[in-house]
Amino acid sequence: MIKRIIDFSHQLLSDTVQKNDTVIDATAGNGNDTFFLSKLVGEKGHVIAFDIQKQAISTVHEMLKQHHITNTQVIHDSHENVSNYLDGVKQLSGAIFNLGYLPKGDKTIITHGESTVKAIQSMFDFLKVNGIIVLVIYHGHEGGKQEKEILLQYVKNLSQKTYNVLQYGFINQKNNPPFIIAIEKRC
């Protein structure tokens, strides 16, 4: 059975991330990926979750408290500044971005291709071999097409000797369906 976008993004991470690993949720949003990652890495693992919106930060903090999750650091900052928060991190096994806007939030506050590229580049030095960065690209909103084009251009130019880059999505759905770009570090 063909997996839906979020299910496939989680499968990619499940295949890579192990207990005790460090991972990043670059767009914490409503906390769904943060929660998923916290379970993958276990009590001794570490999740670093970013969001620029106070509403998202509050939602994630509440979710973590409700589920008694203590392995997660929630940062009120843009993912483009991820390098400021990686002191002491030896390596990352994975990261996920859900790009676009906060569901049920202000649709004028969106992610941007330039900041996402900067975040990805910052993570590469820490990403372990066979580690993965998953981008879930929602592009059916104002500014979404531009972000999509920036990201596609960037990943197409990554060295195939160093990275495997996958694009996964449904091509017969209407209204700009989301798709995945996964970047796996080869060496």
Image: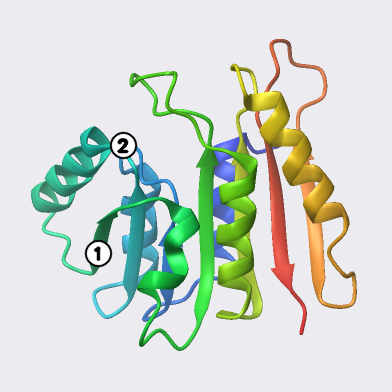
Residue at 70%, 55% (x, y): give it: 182
The relative height of residue 177 versus residue 64 in the rendered view (above or below) is: above
Task: Indicate the position of residue 162 as horizontal and vertical percent values.
Answer: 82, 77
Q: Judging from the image, what secondary structure is the residue with disc 2 in?
A: loop
State the image coordinates of residue 131 (x, y, percent, origin top left).
Answer: 62, 73
Q: In what quadrant of the picture does the C terminus appear?
A: bottom right
Residue shown at the point (78%, 35%) measured from the top left = 149
Tell me the element at label 1.
strand
Residue at position x 36%, y 88% from top? 88
Q: Residue 118's spot in the image, x, y percent? A: 60, 58
Find the distance from the CA under tag 2 to the CA under tag 1: 15 Å
Residue 170 appears in which quarter of the rendering? top right
Quarter of the view holding residue 41 = bottom left
To which residue does mark 2 refer? 30
Is residue 120 at all visible to an observer of this figure? yes
Left or right for 89, reference 177: left
Q: Is residue 19 above or below residue 11?
A: below
The 10 Å Cα crowd at callout 2, few under 14, some 14 to 19, many 20 or more, is many
Classify the position of the N terminus by image quarter. Answer: top right
Q: Nearer the viewer, residue 179 or 120?
A: 120
